[in-house]
Amino acid sequence: MFPLSDSAPARRFPFFTLLLILANVFVFFKEITASDLDAFVLHYAFIPTHINFLDIHSLTPFVTAIFLHDGFLHILSNMWFLYIFGDNVEGELSPAGFLALFLISGIAGNLLQYLIMPHSDIPLIGASGAVAGILGCYYQLFPYSRIKTLVFLFFFVTIIEISAPLMLGYWFVLQIFSGATSLSHMGDQGGVAFFAHIAGFIVGLIVGNIMKKQKDSHLYD
């Protein structure tokens, strides 16, 4: 399932959503035009075996890896999801809160991935965990939104409208099952950091739940 648009109107111009997209695109451009691509990625990617919590310089990839991507399809899919769901979430948070949600979700994703596979020397890159935080927050704040979705069923392709909780809930459950399956292949090279998605989404759920409770409390003030 691939989202095309949502029914919830944004409350304001999504300046910081677009800013994050531009930042990711800029870093991706620097990445693909680097004179030594492998060295560039290894320097900024999150590599669990390189982490030393007593050395602050080794911790910067918790953040820098969020802005790296493994090819055009990787960045296009992440930035599209951010574009579709980010504008609405940005409208509910302060600019600082929105940026913090993105970064903290990405860091939490990398942290859980580290805890699951601390001895891995596979570089982990991508904004998927950070974007997952936006999805989790959207799940909480927009339960009545409808998502126009491109659906692939074998050789049949169609566009349908799905409720946001159904689509995002399905996506989250899929990450859990995929993550559980990936545990049996932890020695393999490459792959998707499913646990980064899971952690990021949970951070978004928590933030969204806090925001929803604050909105509900204001209704009864």
Image (cartoon, rainbow, N blue to C red):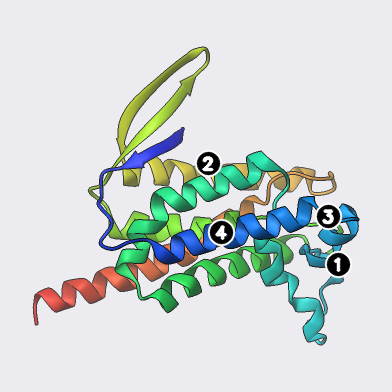
| Label 4 sits on residue | 22
3D distance between C-alphas at marks 1 and 3: 9 Å
Of marks 4 and 2, the one in the foreground = 4
Whether the residues at callouts 1 and 3 have beta carbons within 8 Å, the answer is no
Q: Amino acid at mark 3?
A: Ile
Q: Position of residue 3 (x, y in %)?
A: 42, 38
Q: Nearer the viewer, residue 150 or 115?
A: 150
| Label 3 sits on residue | 122
Query: Dot 4: what SS?
Result: helix
Question: Above or below — where is 145 with respect to 220?
Answer: above
Q: Position of residue 7 (x, y in %)?
A: 26, 44
Query: Dot 2: what SS?
Result: helix
3D distance between C-alphas at marks 2 and 1: 28 Å
Ranked by sequence position, the earlier of labels 2 and 3 is 3
Q: Going by the image, does 34 lie left or right of 90?
A: right
Q: Looking at the figure, which quarter contains the C terminus?
A: bottom left
Ranked by sequence position, the earlier of labels 4 and 2 is 4
| Label 1 sits on residue | 49
Ranked by sequence position, the earlier of labels 2 and 1 is 1
Mark 4 Cα within 10 Å, few/some/many (few <14, many 20+)?
Answer: few
| Label 2 sits on residue | 174
Question: Above or below — where is 56 with respect to 119?
Answer: below
Q: Amino acid at mark 1?
A: Thr
3D distance between C-alphas at marks 2 and 3: 23 Å
The residue under the point 43% across, 41% down is 170
